[in-house]
């Protein structure tokens, strides 16, 4: 096999590969012999069809299929011989396929670009930090009570936070429209489920009251027919229920696995869960910051094959969400995803180089730690752990996450890390950290030396 390499652009390569005629024709003959042994033709016994007839009927298909197989195999052999790293699948094109001449084809593809890693010591990464306070625990206990709230019917006007059921009918310019009626529609007043004017009109109504009122739909309402329009509604309130929160007593505490109902043990259990959630949120935010810094600090020429692949992956995920939401099919142009796809590809190339240069691996004990962490919220943790280890795809995802954590730790070991005090609520809410000097002064930021462990 002869191979020549042509550099058609910075990243694109074109291989011209020539396979000796004898080698190619032998494979064609093997294909025809195999076909002859199993083909059934009228007038011939199985396996006794003359080769001349087999070649007449199937010769063209034999050459095309053999060409396809030879191109794939020869391409893989050629890139290994030439020490090339294809970024995406090649475009294969036959040049010569005639009998009696050497088989020739070209393979055009992009290669991975060289990545020269930036000096990580020049990077500045903000890391949130906080102590969980007694007030934070009180707030969490209150949220746990709200999650277990019950509703009690009351005889008064509806207020914010009440759960109401209502019958309604709306007219647009005096005419009904699709979805203009509802019976026993249930919503929480002030929750934002209903448009603002409708929500406000219900307030003060008691069970049995009927009210007529206009309601303006916002300009960005999801239904184009109603967006920016005024609808005249008639609404009858059927029930008003107010929330009743459970007391934090022994029964409530035991529902969270603290069997003896001890308040101190319960608060410790809540604090432990909050700490795990906080650690995860901090890790995710720091990781996001590090990855952003890596992309912004490198200028890499991107293989368009990888960009197009990432665009279509992002588009497929978006379309899947559209289908799950039972929305109408939408047309999504590639450009809508290009910027994000380019950042993802760049990040993949950079992290790939960090892993290679620093010889990072996903250590089994780290994988185990992450799996156990994922299993922690479940009652039968051992069953969840076993499921991960029996599911290769899921476990591969965990391994990749552990590798990414190793990349983050490698960067943080060299970067300038600024600790920024934040509240538990802000960190859990994912509020973006600010790196400005003014913010550091306000938040009491502390810079860690580059040689101090961080992560």
Image: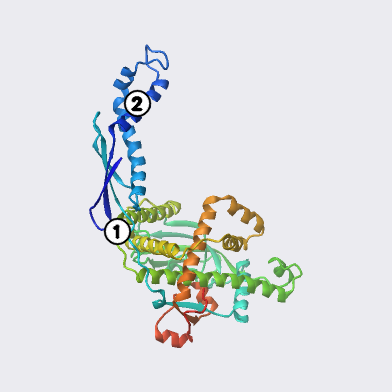
| Crowdedness near tag 2: few (<14), some (14–19) or many (≥20) residues, C-alpha within 10 Å | some
Q: Position of residue 71 (x, y in %)?
A: 32, 39
Residue 225 picture location, percent across and down: 34, 58
User: Would you name the residue on which mark 1 appears?
Assistant: 335
Q: Residue at x 40, y 76 (%)?
A: 123
Question: Which one is closest to the eye, mark 1 or mark 2?
Answer: 2
Q: Is residue 453 above or below residue 376?
A: below
- Label count reads 2
Residue most extreme to the right? 260
Question: Could you tell me which residue is drawn at 45 percent across and 63 percent down?
Answer: 355
- Circle 1 sits in a helix, a strand or a loop, which is it? helix
Q: Is residue 86 left or right of residue 355?
A: left
187 vs 22, nearest the viewer: 22
Residue at image point 39% right, 64% down: 350
Pick the front one: 5 or 57:
5
Dividing the picture into quarters, in which one does residue 254 lie?
Answer: bottom right
Determine which of the numbered discs, if any, sits on residue 29 in the image.
Answer: 2
């Amino acid at each position: 096999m002869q191979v020549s390499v042509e550099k058609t652009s910075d990243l694109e390569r074109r291989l011209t590969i020539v396979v000796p005629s004898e080698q190619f024709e032998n494979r064609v003959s093997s294909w025809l012999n195999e076909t002859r042994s199993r083909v059934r033709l009228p007038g011939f016994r199985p396996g006794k069809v003359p080769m001349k007839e087999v070649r007449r009927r199937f010769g063209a298909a034999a050459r095309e299929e053999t060409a396809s197989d030879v191109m794939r195999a020869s391409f893989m052999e050629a890139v290994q011989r030439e020490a090339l790293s294809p970024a995406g699948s090649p475009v294969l094109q036959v040049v010569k396929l005639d009998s009696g001449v050497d088989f020739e084809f070209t393979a055009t593809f992009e290669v991975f670009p060289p990545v020269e890693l930036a000096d990580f010591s020049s990077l500045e990464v903000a890391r949130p930090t906080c102590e969980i306070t007694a007030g934070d625990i009180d707030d969490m206990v209150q949220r746990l009570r709200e999650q277990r709230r019950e509703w009690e019917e009351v005889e008064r006007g509806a207020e914010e936070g009440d759960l109401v059921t209502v019958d309604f009918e709306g007219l647009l310019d005096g005419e009904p429209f699709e979805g203009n009626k509802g019976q026993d529609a249930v919503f929480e007043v002030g929750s934002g489920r209903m448009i603002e004017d409708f929500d406000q009109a219900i307030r003060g109504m008691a069970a049995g009251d009927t009210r007529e009122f206009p309601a303006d739909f916002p300009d960005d309402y999801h239904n184009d027919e109603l967006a920016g329009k005024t609808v005249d509604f008639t609404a009858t309130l059927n029930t008003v229920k107010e929330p009743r929160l459970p007391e934090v007593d022994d029964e409530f505490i035991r529902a969270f696995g603290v069997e003896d109902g001890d308040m101190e043990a319960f608060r410790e259990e809540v604090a432990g869960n909050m700490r795990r959630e906080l650690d995860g949120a901090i890790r995710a935010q720091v990781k996001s910051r590090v990855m952003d810094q890596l992309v912004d600090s490198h200028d890499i020429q991107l293989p368009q094959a990888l960009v197009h692949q990432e665009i279509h992956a992002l588009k497929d995920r978006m379309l899947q969400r559209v289908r799950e939401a039972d929305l109408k099919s939408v047309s999504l142009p590639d450009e809508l995803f290009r910027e994000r796809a380019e950042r993802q590809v760049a990040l993949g190339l950079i992290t790939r180089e960090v892993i290679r240069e620093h010889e990072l691996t996903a250590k089994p004990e780290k994988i185990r730690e992450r799996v156990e962490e994922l299993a922690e919220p479940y009652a039968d943790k051992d069953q969840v752990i076993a499921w991960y280890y029996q599911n290769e795809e899921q476990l591969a995802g965990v391994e990749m996450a552990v590798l990414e954590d190793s990349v983050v730790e490698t960067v943080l070991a060299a970067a300038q890390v600024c600790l920024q005090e934040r509240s538990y609520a802000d960190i859990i809410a994912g509020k973006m950290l600010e790196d400005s000097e003014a913010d550091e002064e306000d938040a009491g930021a502390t810079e860690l030396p580059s040689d101090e462990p961080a992560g």
